[in-house]
Image (spheres, rainbow, N blue to C red):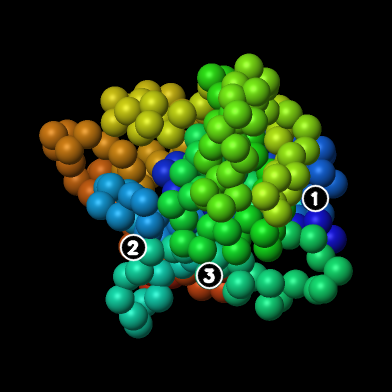
Amino acid sequence: MNVALFGGTFDPIHRGHLAVARAAMERYALGKVLFVPANIQPLKKHAPVTAYIHRYAMVSLAVAGEKKFVPSLLEAPNPQGPAHPSYTIDTVRTLRRSLRKSDRLFILIGIDAFIHIAKWRESEALLRGCEFIVANRPGFSLAHVARALPESMRPEAMVSQLFRKQKPSGDLAIGGAMIHLLEEVEDPSSATKIRTTAAKGGNLGTVVGESVAEYIRKVGLYRAKAEPEDDERTEAKPKLEIVGGKAHRKGSEPARHSKRS
């Protein structure tokens, strides 16, 4: 089976993420896409981020009904240990222990994140140990992909220069890595804009889906800090815990949905 690991902050997950996953699933015959919310992004350790439990809950809601999309707790925080960054190389090694030898593992990533790959922990081992599916976005060329590689895997400057006017597409075998370049997926969704819209009380259904929009509204995520909380909104903040891979209110039975969550 072809299995893709799709990691990220997912703060929040939106239809752009789902569109990329669907495009990759169809293009590379993926049998399963694991959506893996990061506990702490190593390159963004001090960036403010919504609590893991809420991001995982939103991922679960967003992929409900998609049989091949699976919410994953691979990078969930350890409640009995100190918080630590989520390193993809560690996640891959953990995941491989549950896969069959015949399974083919891909890492699905946006090109805006891939250009920082050389800064990742054991990036060379990661690039040589997994195939990458890199989703293109406007403004990037094949040269961005080549220059992003660790120095030992990077082509000569003259070669990278030739890539400058070429769009990232097709398959690129380079420096011992196999990189599949997924063409642009038309979707303008932006997590930053979604958080801003939510803070203003705007409609989110068209960009995150109704179930995620309803969750954001009920829990009160992304509200402006200066916005006063009335009793109704305070009560709308449930205390959540993860049981059996599902998010539900603490002290109550897990919520039942007509669709998978």
Tell me which label, 1 or 3, sits earlier in the chain: 1
- In the displayed image of the protein, which residue is found farthest to the bottom? 80
- Tell me where residue 124 appears, x and y as whole percent: 57, 59
Depicted 157 relative to depicted 121: above or below: above
Q: Which mark is residue 30?
A: 1
Is any atom of residue 122 visible in this view? yes
Going by the numbered disc 1, the residue's amino acid type is Leu
**Is residue 15 visible from the viewing direction of this image?**
no
Q: Nearer the viewer, residue 238 or 61?
A: 61
Tell whether 2 sits left or right of 175: right
Which quadrant of the structure image shows residue 186?
top right
Q: Amino acid at mark 2?
A: Lys
- How many labels sit on residues? 3
In x, y percent, where is residue 72?
A: 59, 62
Query: Which residue lies at the image location 82% right of the left edge and 73% below the top edge?
Result: 101
Q: Quarter of the image containing the C terminus? A: bottom right
* Image coordinates for residue 179, horizontal then vertical, percent: 70, 44
Q: Position of residue 155 (x, y in %)?
A: 62, 40
The amino acid beneath tag 3 is: Asp
